[in-house]
């Protein structure tokens, strides 16, 4: 019944549609809007490189400050939000190996 997909990717027929709109989900199947939060953040990411995990219980946006602007702009701004460029990562909120 529960599924997680990249933003705006439709669910399978096994998805329990009652989860849409629950808690922090703001999917609108009639508009083909799926798997996004109230702030427009995606439930899943597909990044072409490895990035550090956040420390347990750390908000992802506080560890990657430019992520919110990237996600809320539909991917038009801060396209390098995940790289190790100045201002993109907060080192003390990440597990650096």
Image (cartoon, rainbow, N blue to C red):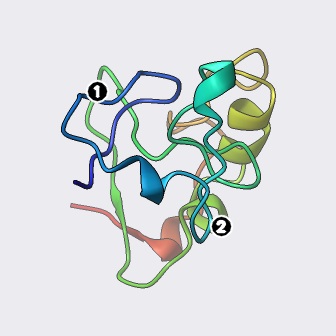
The N terminus lies in quadrant = bottom left
Residue underneath mark 2: 62
Q: Quadrant of residue 86?
A: top right
Q: Is residue 1 left or right of residue 17?
A: left
Q: Can residue 87 be seen in the rendering of this structure?
A: no
Kindly identify which numbered label has been placed on residue 70.
none
Q: Quadrant of residue 74?
A: top right
Seen at 23% across and 29% down, the residue is 13
x then y, percent, for residue 51: 33, 43
The one nearer the camera, 17 or 37, is: 17
Residue underneath mark 1: 49
Seen at 65% across and 24% down, the residue is 30
x then y, percent, for residue 68: 73, 46
The one nearer the camera, 62 or 27, is: 27
Up-down relation of residue 91 to residue 20 (above or below): below
The C terminus lies in quadrant = bottom left
Question: Could you say whether the residue bearing mark 2 is in a helix, strand or loop?
Answer: helix
Question: Could you say whether the residue bearing mark 1 is in a helix, strand or loop?
Answer: loop
x then y, percent, for residue 21: 61, 56
Q: Is residue 95 left or right of residue 13?
A: right
Q: Earlier in the sequence, mark 1 or mark 2?
A: 1
Q: Can residue 45 be seen in the rendering of this structure?
A: yes
What is the residue that sits farthest to the bottom in this orientation?
Answer: 57
Seen at 57% across and 65% down, the residue is 22
For disc 2, the neighbor class at 10 Å (few under 14, some 14 to 19, many from 20) is some
Seen at 79% across and 21% down, the residue is 77
The one nearer the camera, 80 or 8, is: 8
For disc 1, the neighbor class at 10 Å (few under 14, some 14 to 19, many from 20) is few
Up-down relation of residue 44 to residue 76 (above or below): below
Q: Is residue 62 left or right of residue 8?
A: right
Q: CA distance from mark 1 to mark 2?
A: 20 Å
């Amino acid at each position: 019944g529960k599924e997680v997909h990249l933003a705006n990717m439709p669910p399978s027929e096994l998805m329990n549609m009652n989860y849409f709109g629950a808690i922090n989900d703001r999917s609108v199947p009639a508009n083909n809007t799926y798997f996004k939060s109230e702030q427009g953040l995606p439930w899943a990411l597909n990044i072409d490189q490895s990035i550090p995990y956040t420390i347990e219980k750390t908000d992802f946006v506080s560890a990657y400050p430019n992520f919110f602007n990237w996600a809320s702009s539909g991917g038009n701004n801060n396209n390098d939000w995940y790289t190790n460029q100045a201002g993109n990562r907060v080192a003390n909120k990440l597990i650096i190996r």
